[in-house]
Amino acid sequence: MKRKIRVMMVEDHPDYREGIKVALETETDIELTSIFGTAERALRSLQDRDQRREPDIVLLDLNLPGISGIEALPYFRKSIPSAKVIVLTQSDQESDVLNAISGGASGYLLKTATLNQITEGIRTVIAGGASLDANVAGYILSLLKKKPRKAELRVTLSGREIEVLSLLCEGLLKKEISDRLNISIPTVATHVRHIYEKLEVQNAAAAVHKAHHFGIFPDED
């Protein structure tokens, strides 16, 4: 039997924590294994490697007492490199969105998201996709396309790799990209691996950010 997706939640609002906890208890493939009100306590819990159950997903709020979610993000990435971080926050500020994505977050959801959107976001990230609030995704694309190129990136993505990366940005999974481009799933996985290697990133959101920053996507009118 396939094990459940293990989730750690770092959220200081008791009512919101309880709502997420109750919702995840009804899911057959997801389990909430730990809840913390501060990033410091969550990170401290990861120091005891013999007793912890390492999470697959960290749901991370940004506006936390003590260390903020943005400040804590690199520490989570270092402590549990195999886990994916999904920012779950009220903030749609430009700086927070870009700092989270560039810092390695695999998803960025607003607290206005439905519980179904949150659970589907968890599954999407585990499957290798990027879970982005629709408005945030559109904002990222429009903003980054307008940003001036600060330097030249000494890598080249093939036309097919750019197509695959564009579809990842839309939140499509490998199976959906396979259907859209009429190529096999293993071929899609190979393209994704090559994209990450060339751009030196670990997830789709960071790849999209870097590709737009360096002007890899063709200009659109």
Image: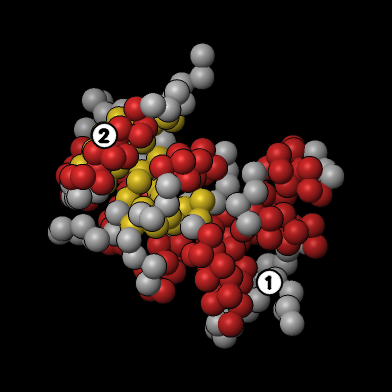
Q: Where in the figure is residue 12, as x and y percent of width and height?
A: 19, 50
Q: CA distance from mark 1 to mark 2?
A: 40 Å
Q: Where in the figure is residue 105, as x and y percent of width and height?
A: 43, 55
- Callout in the foreground (1, 2): 2
Identify the residue at the far top of this view.
Answer: 1
Q: Is residue 120 visible?
A: yes
Residue under pointer 2: 34
Q: Is residue 195 visible?
A: no
Q: Secondary structure at mark 1?
A: loop
Residue 57: name its quadrant.
Answer: top left
Amino acid under label 2? Ser
Residue 110: name its quadrant.
Answer: bottom left
Q: Which mark is residue 216?
A: 1
Q: Which image quarter holds the C terminus?
A: bottom right
Residue drawn at x 68%, y 71% is 216
| Foreground of the two, 221 or 192 | 221
Q: Secondary structure at mark 2?
A: strand
| Foreground of the two, 193 or 138 | 138
Q: Residues within 10 Å of mark 1 (few under 14, many from 20)?
A: some
**Number of marks in the image?**
2
> Above or below — where is 215 with respect to 54?
below
> Above or below — where is 26 with respect to 89?
above
